């Protein structure tokens, strides 16, 4: 015999009546909020904003967001957080479905340029607010200036080269001249220029997949970088590396690395070599310095911590430069990192560390000088967190829909190139005409690079196995001394080269 369906007992009628003590509860809650307005209100509001939007437009500093968020998660206001999380999940779903549909790629518009001090977290290392207008009468006081004319022009040229080169890459990518993913560096130029322009050719740099501008700053000719991007045999890796794997032994560029964090141990290894050559092999001369550039997301990777430990233990001449652009693809730094102030991880290993405004090349340079000198003296490594921002999506395939427009506008208004230009003009270090002529020169360099890359040949079949195996004789080269791949049947059915 079939059982009747279970029925729920009726609700007790007292639960359906309005609670007699509800007004009293509301009154207590209101008084509580009014009694402690700032932290409590901030917790509730910011938890909604932080989690729902990741980057609320009205907050002045991302650090502030992180503070509110950590308070929120620790505090008693989990309910709004959970609600906001659901909202965020739903909105993320909508956004990702747009991505999957391949909504037209938005090539980042040129930033609305306007200079401005913005708000800057206090750097641990001494650094002047160099983008501020100098006091009246200080124009002629050249002793106060942080750069000479030659240095200022060199920095400006390098940053304009980086920006123009990347803008040209975007055009070439959308015209189908490049393959795979291409990650641009727009907005972060002050970091590459601020550090690398202090280095010698014999110093070493490791980079990430966002590596074109590091290569240019280190002196790899624009022609070679562009040709590499085009996959041509005249590229700095003879067309075998592409966008994410720039390398030039001649310029001490030890590679862009597509796997995040991989460049860090390579830089530490290079630094070990420098020290070993000086101390054990008794080589003369300055100790070469190594710099590892990597992002905020990468700073949560295990090898970062292992390398900090080893570098500090052996006092290696290496500088760890975190380019904290607040995002790892679509993941906000503040949602993924227990303590968002990355520079604080250095002191845990006894390492000198600093935070610096990465949108200000002169501040970056001041902090970098100290670190480079420390490394060259043999006094060991430094960890430096540069607070910066990328002006375009994660890669050129990213429509960049996850970051709040107000956050983008906030950093666009602090464009590092505009800020340096203003400093050079305000302090009469350079004239408008001199800066214009640099811009014109760079336009020509970049156009020439494209023409060169376009006209260059593709790699020949014989390059197919080059650099693939450590000992190509064991595999790629036949007994006759020729590459096996030169046999026309070698790649049949597997590749078209
Ligand atoms: C070992 C490894 N894990 C995951 C990825 C996928 N991935 C590519 S970019 C990226 C985010 C890195 O962000 P960040 O370090 O902040 O660098 P940014 O892109 O902001 O310069 C991740 C996780 C990868 N490339 N390598
Ligand atoms: Mg990042």
Image: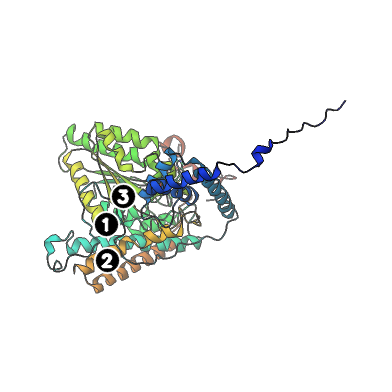
Q: Are marks 3 and 2 in contact (CB under 8 Å)?
A: no
Rendering coords of residue 102 (x, y %)? 58, 56
SS label for mark 3: strand
Element type where label 1 sits in the image:
helix
x then y, percent, for residue 247: 36, 48
Q: Residues within 10 Å of mark 3 (few under 14, many from 20)?
A: many
Residue 496: mark in rendering: none
For residue 476, above or below residue 250: above
Horizontal placement of 457 versus 440: left or right?
right
Extreme residue in the top direction: 1
First in sequence: mark 3 or mark 2?
A: 3
Quick one: 68 or 393, which is closer to the camera? 68
In the picture provided, is 224 more to the left or to the right than 400?
A: left
The residue indicated by pointer 1 is 361
Q: Is residue 487 visible?
A: no
Outermost bottom residue: 433
**Which numbered tag is attached to residue 421?**
2
For disc 3, the marked residue is 386
Q: Is residue 459 above or below residue 298?
A: below
Q: Is residue 444 above or below residue 346?
A: below
Q: Residues within 10 Å of mark 2 (few under 14, many from 20)?
A: many
Secondary structure under badge 2?
Answer: helix
Residue 484 on image: x %, y %: 49, 41
What's the distance in space between the residues labelled 3 and 2, CA to CA? 20 Å
**Residue 253: image location, x then y, percent:** 31, 48
Does residue 300 show up?
Answer: yes
Whichever of callouts 2 and 1 sits on the residue coming sooner in the sequence is 1
How far apart marks 1 and 3 lie (CA) works out to: 10 Å
């Amino acid at each position: 015999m079939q059982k009747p369906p279970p029925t729920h007992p009726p609700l007790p009628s007292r639960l359906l009546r309005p609670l007699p003590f509800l007004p009293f509860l509301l009154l207590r809650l209101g008084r509580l909020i009014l009694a402690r307005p700032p932290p409590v209100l901030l917790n509730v509001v910011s938890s909604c904003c932080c989690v729902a939007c990741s980057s609320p437009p009205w907050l002045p500093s991302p650090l502030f967001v992180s503070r509110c968020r950590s308070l929120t998660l620790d505090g008693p206001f989990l309910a709004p957080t959970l609600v906001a999380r659901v909202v965020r999940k739903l909105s993320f779903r909508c956004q990702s479905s747009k991505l999957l549909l391949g909504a037209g790629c938005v090539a980042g518009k040129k930033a609305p340029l306007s200079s401005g001090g913005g708000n800057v977290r206090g750097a641990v290392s001494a650094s002047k607010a160099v983008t501020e207008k100098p006091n009246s009468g200080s124009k002629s006081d050249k002793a106060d200036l942080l750069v000479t004319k030659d240095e200022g022009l060199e920095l400006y040229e390098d940053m304009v080269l980086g920006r123009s080169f990347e803008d040209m890459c975007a055009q070439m990518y959308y015209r189908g001249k490049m393959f795979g993913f291409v990650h641009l560096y727009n907005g972060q130029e002050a970091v590459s220029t601020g550090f690398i322009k202090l280095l010698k050719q014999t110093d070493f740099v490791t980079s990430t997949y966002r590596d074109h501008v590091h290569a240019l700053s280190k002196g790899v000719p624009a022609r070679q970088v562009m040709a590499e991007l085009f996959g041509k045999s005249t590229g700095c890796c003879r067309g075998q590396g592409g966008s994410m794997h720039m390398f030039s032994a001649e310029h001490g560029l030890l590679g862009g690395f597509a796997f995040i964090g991989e460049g860090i141990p390579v830089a530490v290894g290079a630094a070990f070599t420098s020290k070993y050559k000086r101390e054990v092999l008794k080589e003369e001369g300055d100790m070469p310095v190594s710099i590892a550039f990597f992002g905020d997301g990468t700073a949560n990777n295990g090898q970062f911590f292992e390398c900090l430990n080893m570098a500090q233990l052996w006092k290696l001449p290496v500088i760890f430069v975190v380019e904290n652009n607040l995002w790892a693809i679509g993941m906000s730094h503040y949602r993924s990192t227990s303590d968002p102030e990355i520079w604080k991880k250095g002191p845990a290993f006894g390492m000198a560390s600093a935070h610096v405004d990465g949108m200000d090349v002169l501040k970056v340079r001041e902090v970098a000088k100290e670190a480079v000198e420390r490394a060259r003296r043999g006094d060991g490594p430094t960890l430096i967190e540069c607070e910066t921002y990328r002006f375009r999506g994660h890669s050129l395939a990213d429509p960049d829909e996850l970051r709040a427009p107000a956050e983008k506008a906030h950093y666009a208004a602090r464009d590092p190139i505009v800020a340096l230009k203003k400093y050079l003009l305000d302090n009469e270090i350079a004239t408008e005409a001199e800066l214009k002529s640099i811009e014109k020169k760079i336009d020509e360099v970049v156009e020439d690079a494209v023409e060169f890359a376009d006209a260059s040949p593709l790699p020949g079949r014989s390059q197919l196995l080059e650099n693939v195996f450590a000992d190509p004789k064991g595999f790629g080269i036949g007994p006759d001394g020729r590459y096996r791949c030169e046999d026309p049947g070698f790649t049949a059915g597997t590749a078209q080269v």
